[in-house]
Image: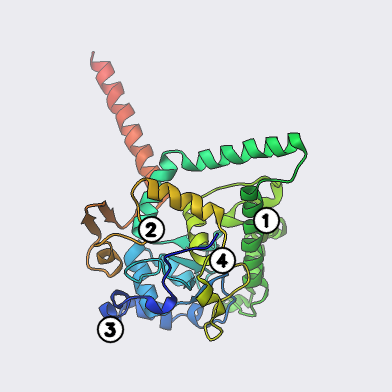
């Protein structure tokens, strides 16, 4: 399936460049002062390296420093109408950070993150997994090969696993006074068996060893779509530093999510005013398509809902005791 309406990497618009001219800040220091930025690491399929402007954009979009310290690349093709990167590829073992990152991609576009949050809350991910289970039962009963969607998901898991292995095993970097390689850091933290699971993990850290297609996070799949479906002209452009292995013109998972968003009136290229967040002008943008703000991470959202539920339960008990 051919992707349409894409802009080449050169069309990352003036919003993503002129807004930050002659600026030097914490974001530039993160890029220029960290060994993370100077290491030559393999790029995720369809990715190009980031620059200081991209680091600024990521921080505006997420208000999170950890991803900025781990970022490696951005999609070679820009979908955003304002020219901002909507996703980034990450180092699974960021330099100078005492943590591991299981997912290789991070969706950062505030509009897409929030609208996909709603899709997940409404059970769209469960619908996809249920569809996969039903198709698996059908193919098993009829003794034929699996569905195209299931095959694509399994193949995508393999691409993420091989990309992670390339990042961990091809590097000669040492970490601090320990002189440990990235893979040795993983093994030290997780043990040999845990390190193997970490290496084999698929999209969003999913475990593909079960042989069962697993959709774990719609955000990660949307990021995968943005990276792995560059336009033909970008793929063919030899002077660009684009990792071509693993790119595709047919991404059924991404198309499913994209269609679900379009059915809800969400244009993945953005709204008229959403650039205000990515450029750092504001944390909330309002248009006729609804408001967009810097997203709260899902784990924090869950903790907030749990606390709110506990408060309501305590209040209910108090009221019951007063009756």
Q: Residue at x 23, y 58 (%)?
A: 285
Q: Secondary structure at mark 1?
A: helix
Q: Secondary structure at mark 3?
A: loop
- For mark 4, what is the residue? 92
Q: If you read the primary sequence from the N terminus, does the residue marked by circle 3 or circle 2 appear first?
A: 3
Residue 303 seen in the figure: yes
Answer yes or no: do the residues labelled 1 and 3 have beta carbons within 8 Å?
no
**x, y percent for residue 26:** 33, 76
Count neighbours of disc 2 (C-alpha within 10 A) and say few if under 14, some if 14 to 19, many if 20 or more.
some
Q: Residue at x 58, y 56 (%)?
A: 203
Answer yes or no: do the residues labelled 2 and 1 have beta carbons within 8 Å?
no
**x, y percent for residue 198:** 64, 58
- For mark 2, what is the residue? 268
Determine the image quadrant of residue 200.
Answer: bottom right
Q: Residue 30: give its label.
A: none
- For mark 1, what is the residue? 197
Q: If you read the primary sequence from the N terminus, does the residue marked by circle 1 or circle 4 appear first?
A: 4
Answer yes or no: do the residues labelled 3 and 2 have beta carbons within 8 Å?
no
Q: Residue at x 36, y 70 (%)?
A: 84
- For mark 3, what is the residue? 21
Q: Secondary structure at mark 2?
A: loop
**Is residue 132 shown left or right of residue 140?**
left
Q: Secondary structure at mark 4?
A: loop
Count neighbours of disc 4 (C-alpha within 10 A) and say few if under 14, some if 14 to 19, many if 20 or more.
many
Query: What colour scheme governs how the chains and residues are painted in the rendered image of this protein?
Result: rainbow
The residues tagged by marks 2 and 4 sit, at their Cα atoms, a distance apart of 27 Å
The residues tagged by marks 2 and 1 sit, at their Cα atoms, a distance apart of 33 Å
Tell us which disc is closer to us: 3 or 4.
3
The residues tagged by marks 3 and 4 sit, at their Cα atoms, a distance apart of 31 Å
Q: Residue at x 62, y 52 (%)?
A: 153
């Amino acid at each position: 399936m051919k992707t349409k309406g894409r802009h080449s990497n050169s069309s990352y618009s003036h919003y993503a460049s002129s807004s930050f001219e002659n600026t030097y800040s914490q974001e530039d220091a993160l890029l220029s002062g960290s060994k993370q930025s100077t290491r030559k690491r393999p790029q995720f399929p369809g990715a190009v390296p980031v620059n200081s402007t991209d680091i600024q954009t990521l921080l505006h979009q997420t208000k999170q420093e950890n991803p900025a310290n781990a970022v490696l690349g951005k999609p070679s093709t820009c979908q955003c109408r304002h020219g901002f990167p909507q996703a980034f590829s990450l180092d699974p073992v960021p330099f100078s950070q005492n943590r591991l990152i299981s997912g290789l991609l991070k969706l950062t576009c505030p509009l897409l993150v929030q609208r996909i949050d709603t899709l997940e809350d409404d059970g769209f991910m469960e619908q996809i997994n249920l569809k996969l289970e039903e198709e698996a039962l059908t193919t098993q009963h009829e003794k034929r090969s699996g569905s195209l969607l299931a095959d694509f998901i399994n193949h995508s898991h393999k691409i993420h696993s091989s990309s992670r292995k390339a990042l961990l095993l091809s590097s000669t970097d040492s970490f601090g006074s320990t002189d440990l390689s990235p893979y040795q850091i993983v093994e030290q933290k997780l043990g040999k068996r845990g390190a193997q699971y970490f290496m084999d993990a698929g999209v969003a850290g999913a475990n593909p060893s079960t042989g069962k297609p697993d959709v774990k996070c719609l955000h990660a799949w949307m990021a995968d779509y943005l990276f792995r479906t560059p336009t033909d002209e970008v793929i063919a452009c030899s002077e660009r530093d684009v990792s071509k292995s693993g790119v595709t013109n047919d991404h059924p998972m991404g198309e499913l999510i994209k269609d679900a968003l379009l059915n809800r009136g969400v244009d993945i290229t953005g709204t008229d005013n959403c650039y205000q967040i990515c450029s750092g002008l504001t944390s909330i943008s309002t248009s006729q398509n609804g408001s967009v703000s810097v997203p709260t991470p899902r784990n924090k959202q869950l903790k907030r809902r749990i606390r709110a539920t506990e408060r309501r339960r305590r209040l209910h008990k108090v009221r019951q005791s007063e009756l």
